[in-house]
Image (cartoon, rainbow, N blue to C red):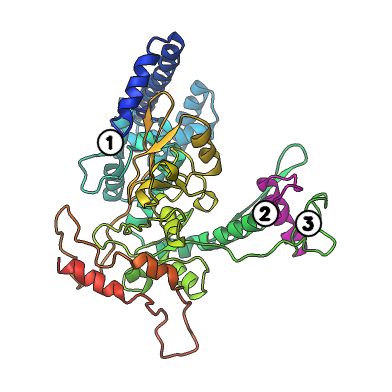
């Protein structure tokens, strides 16, 4: 983590400072704060050391090339490269495969990723972040790699990343955001790349220790998400006071039994096997796949990706297929055509509407606790300021922490704060350090050729011409495409007011 947490002026920060003044007299508190500060500095030193390692490795390669005479053949050139990799592997006591990957990454950082190397030298990102930048720029041209770097590492870029800096994101979350940017800006369309990779789908079997093994499948994203959500729903249906297995164990048992017998696992007392009736009373619910797709892309006018909840960008053809098949949890949300952000949903009663819950999933994408990747379907809507304490049920006072971090909020002094219609809440620790949450990187939608982009009215958006649209969408189910009438368009718009909304923005 680049920043190691900071203490901002948030609501309640004055009370925190007053409490901090009382704690200053506590030597144990001083020791704890000193340990955290020391760990943050060690992380920065590790990053700077990694940057020095990169430069030394790159200079070593350059020096060996300068010392050697020109290669007489391609075979001789390959042999020299093998010798360099072998030398580095012996010096670092790593495998030659690891040494080769290190050299490749070092060369990319030195020659093509100057912002990444500079951030690593400054200690604002970790070596893991730098490796992810190398991975995600592989296959991009020079302009694409520079654009990805600038988006995450240059605050003065035309389209800087929203929310906390890249170095403040856990490496796995930074990879997800960098991959999403790469998918949207790659020279080859996501349709073309998906078609190429779909031919690589496969199932792999890997033996492991203690009589166990791994079974993994490489599948199209919508298929994999559907399998995961359907298995999770069936596992939850089995949970209860008499069921000793965890949700993770239930997922594994259900998957194995479905694959081997076409039935689900038995309930409690079945010793993990199949119940007498072969079903165990477990429903086979339809997968809940939430998908956000730009309207123009849904209609085929543009080719920009849709977003599959819990995964990221997917080809628009996949999104259209999900809509045509009547995916039960498909939910289209009005978005501002200038920045791609959904509009806020409001409510004054305690209980959330279905539209509000879906809004939280769209705003946060996951548990908002820093570094947590828990899928949004598993999370729990929660008031940041308690309803009993005067909190409202507006989006700006709602979060959707996972069960673990929901308990953390109520059982400890960790406090979420700072949410808005487009920003999930950050978290303040018991020591007073504030850790920002990850933000979704919404972008303006693509417009078909020949249609001018909407004008920029300035920093203030015009009033919402349909403030009660969420009530309308909550009460009207989006119908599946009707294919019986050959003269009917494949996707009817159940919300024709969208056109009026766009026209209002265009005339603003």
Question: For the residue labelled by badge 1, is the local secondary structure a helix, a strand or a loop?
Answer: helix
Left or right placement of residue 336 versus residue 19 in this view: left
Q: Magenta stretch: dominant SS?
A: helix
Stretch in magenta: 235-262
Residue 266: numbered disc:
3
Q: Position of residue 30 (x, y in %)?
A: 41, 12
Question: For the residue labelled by badge 3, is the local secondary structure a helix, a strand or a loop?
Answer: loop
- Residue 118: image quadrant is top left
Residue 235: numbered disc:
2
Q: Quadrant of the C terminus?
A: bottom left
Question: Mark 3 and mark 2: span between their CA atoms?
Answer: 11 Å
- For disc 1, the marked residue is 115
Mark 1: few, some, or many residues within 10 Å (few <14, many ≥20)? some
Q: Position of residue 116 (x, y in %)?
A: 32, 35
Write the residue at 23% across / 60% down.
338
Is residue 332 one of those drawn in magenta?
no
- Residue 358: image quadrant is bottom left
């Amino acid at each position: 983590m680049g920043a190691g947490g900071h203490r901002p002026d948030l609501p309640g920060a004055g009370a925190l400072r007053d409490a901090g003044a009382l704690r200053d007299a506590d030597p144990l508190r001083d020791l704890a704060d000193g340990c955290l500060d020391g760990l943050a500095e060690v992380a920065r030193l590790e990053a700077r050391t990694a940057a020095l390692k990169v430069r030394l490795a790159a200079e070593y390669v350059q020096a060996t090339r300068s010392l050697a005479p020109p290669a007489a053949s391609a075979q001789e050139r390959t042999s020299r490269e093998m010798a360099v990799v072998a030398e580095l592997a012996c010096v670092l006591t790593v495998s030659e495969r690891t040494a080769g990957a290190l050299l490749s990454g070092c060369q990319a950082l030195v020659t093509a990723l100057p912002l990444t190397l500079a951030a690593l030298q400054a200690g604002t990102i970790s070596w893991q972040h730098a490796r992810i930048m190398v991975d995600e720029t592989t296959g991009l041209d020079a302009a694409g790699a520079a654009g990805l770097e600038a988006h995450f590492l240059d605050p003065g870029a035309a389209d800087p990343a929203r929310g906390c800096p890249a170095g403040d994101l856990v490496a796995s979350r930074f990879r997800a955001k960098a991959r999403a940017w790469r998918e949207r800006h790659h020279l080859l369309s996501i349709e073309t790349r998906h078609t190429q990779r779909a031919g690589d789908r496969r199932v792999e079997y890997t033996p492991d220790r203690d009589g166990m093994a791994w079974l993994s499948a490489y599948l199209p994203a919508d298929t994999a998400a559907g399998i995961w959500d359907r298995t999770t729903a069936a596992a939850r249906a089995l949970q209860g006071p008499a069921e000793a297995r965890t949700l993770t164990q239930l997922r594994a048992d259900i998957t194995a039994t479905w694959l081997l017998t076409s039935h689900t696992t038995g309930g409690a007392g079945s010793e993990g096997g199949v119940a007498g009736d072969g079903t165990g009373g477990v429903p086979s619910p339809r997968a809940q796949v939430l998908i956000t797709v730009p309207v123009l892309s849904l209609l085929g006018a543009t080719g920009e990706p849709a977003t599959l909840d819990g995964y990221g960008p997917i080809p628009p053809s996949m999104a259209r297929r999900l809509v045509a098949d009547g995916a039960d949890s498909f939910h289209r949300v009005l978005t501002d055509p200038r920045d791609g952000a959904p509009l806020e949903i409001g409510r004054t009663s305690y209980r959330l509407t279905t539209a509000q819950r879906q809004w939280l999933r769209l705003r946060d994408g996951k548990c908002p606790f820093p570094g947590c990747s828990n899928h949004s379907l598993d999370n729990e809507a929660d008031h940041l300021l308690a309803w009993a304490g005067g909190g409202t049920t507006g989006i700006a006072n709602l979060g959707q922490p996972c069960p673990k971090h929901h308990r953390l909020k109520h059982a400890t002094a960790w406090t979420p704060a700072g949410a808005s219609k487009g920003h999930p809440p950050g978290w303040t620790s018991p020591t007073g350090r504030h850790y920002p949450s990850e933000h979704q990187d919404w972008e303006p939608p693509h417009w078909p050729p020949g249609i001018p982009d909407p004008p920029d009215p300035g920093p203030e958006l015009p009033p919402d011409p349909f403030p009660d649209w969420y009530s309308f969408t909550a009460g009207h189910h989006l119908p599946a495409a009707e294919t019986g009438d050959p003269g009917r368009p494949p996707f009817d718009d159940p919300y024709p007011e969208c056109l009026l909304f766009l026209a209002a923005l265009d005339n603003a």
